[in-house]
Image (spheres, rainbow, N blue to C red):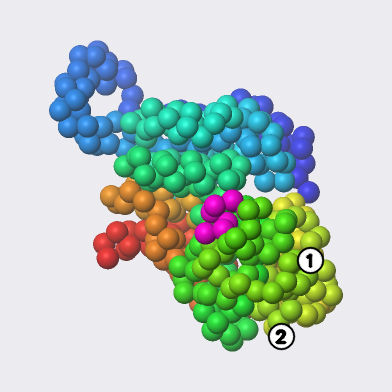
Amino acid sequence: MVDMNRVLKMHKAHTGVLDLKADISIKTPDDLSEAYTPGVAGLAKMIAEDEALKNVYTMSGKLIPIITDGSAVLGLGNIGPAAGLPIVEGKALIYKEFSGVNAIPMALNQVDVDEFVETIKTMAPSFAGIHLEDIAAPRVFEIEKRLNEELDIPVYHDDQTGTAVVVLAALINAAKVVNKPLKDLKVVINGMGAAGVATAKILLASGMKNLTLVDIHGVIRADDNDYNDYQRELATAVNQVDGQSLDDVIDNQDVFIGLSDANVLSKEQVTRMAQDAIVFALANPVPEILPEEAHEGGAAITATGSSQWANQVNNVLVFPGLFKGLLATDIKKVELSLQVKLAEGLAQMITTPTADHIVPRVFDDGVVDAVSNAVIAYAKA
């Protein structure tokens, strides 16, 4: 358990956990004239003639914002933009400490999609990429889509892409442990919000086809207006199965991926899954089923979103290395094909996967470099 007194003391001591540090010292009149006026006038003229030079001569070439409106904070829900600041500030700290990437926390008021997109577009010249965080679906799907279309810098939504990449990495190694071909696995994804949609997309992109998608209303179907356009579009690419609920479709599934709510999967349901079932119960703070209950039901491998158990699916494995790699290349889009390569890079870090070790741990040596090197290799391919 986290000691809240220590948390409060840590954050209060420095008014947060971040600061802005100078890369050079100003000790003489010459230093001042070169770092500021009149020297910067020459830089300004150069950038006016060639805007790309801003990424060479200003920190915009190494700076990203982590933007939230606090509408979908893990485990807390819609808590608003101000309350979302500790989360994005913490992630900015992780960027700096783990990969040296400069990130600043930013909270935007909850506004309609058009205003949100236009606000970010007006700020975009200051940054080398955009990290979206804790923005509710389906709004965030449209926000991310439009920003990717209208900006020439990478746009990354951690709740979608980060989760999806680690899930695929874990599944690649889990399939090896249970000796089943990855592409033949029958998978049910329970919870089709931002993370669920992204996970379905990356599994399809990896070559998997036997997917069943379930949400709060039941099995998602392309002709069901209870679901948004993004969910229905995915439904056209996956299995059209008989059954209305998770309970109806759980029989003989090789894999359960939960991105939903606590305690929605029972031990009895796990007993009806295929032999050597794989159960990823990723709801936080309480998983869809406790790992020990899943194992009692016959699961061979479990993973959660918590460090309390083995096999933590944690986005921290992805985003520091991802942007380290993006900032070292000219990649403008985090395409699905790149996401698959990132997952493969993470999976390959585990040379001999076991039931209790299918993904790297956050503090394992080489995690950031494995991801950033995958980005760089993708850029060169």
Q: Which residues are magenta?
A: 227-233
Instruction: Name the residue at 47% across, 32% down.
Output: 114
Residue 265 tag number: 1
Q: Is residue 232 magenta?
A: yes
Residue 54 spot, x, y in % from top left = 26, 32
**In the image: residue 371, left or right of residue 158:** left
- The quarter holding residue 49 reads top left
Crowdedness near tag 2: few (<14), some (14–19) or many (≥20) residues, C-alpha within 10 Å: some
Residue 141 spot, x, y in % from top left = 52, 47
Three-letter residue code for mark 2: Gln
Three-letter residue code for mark 1: Leu
Residue 275, can we see it?
yes
Nearer the observer, 265 or 128: 265
Crowdedness near tag 1: few (<14), some (14–19) or many (≥20) residues, C-alpha within 10 Å: many
Q: Are marks 1 and 2 in contact (CB under 8 Å)?
A: no
Question: Tag 2's secondary structure?
Answer: loop
- The quarter holding residue 153 reads top left
Q: Is residue 192 magenta?
A: no
Q: Which residue is mark 2?
A: 275
Residue 104, can we see it?
no
Instruction: Name the residue at 56% across, 29% down.
Output: 111
Instruction: Name the residue at 44% across, 53% down.
Output: 321
Determine the CA span between mark 1 and mark 2.
17 Å
Instruction: Name the residue at 57% across, 58% down.
Output: 232
- The quarter holding residue 56 reads top left
Nearer the observer, 16 or 87: 87
Total numbered labels? 2
Secondary structure predominantly adopted by residues drawn in magenta: helix
Q: Earlier in the sequence, mark 1 or mark 2?
A: 1
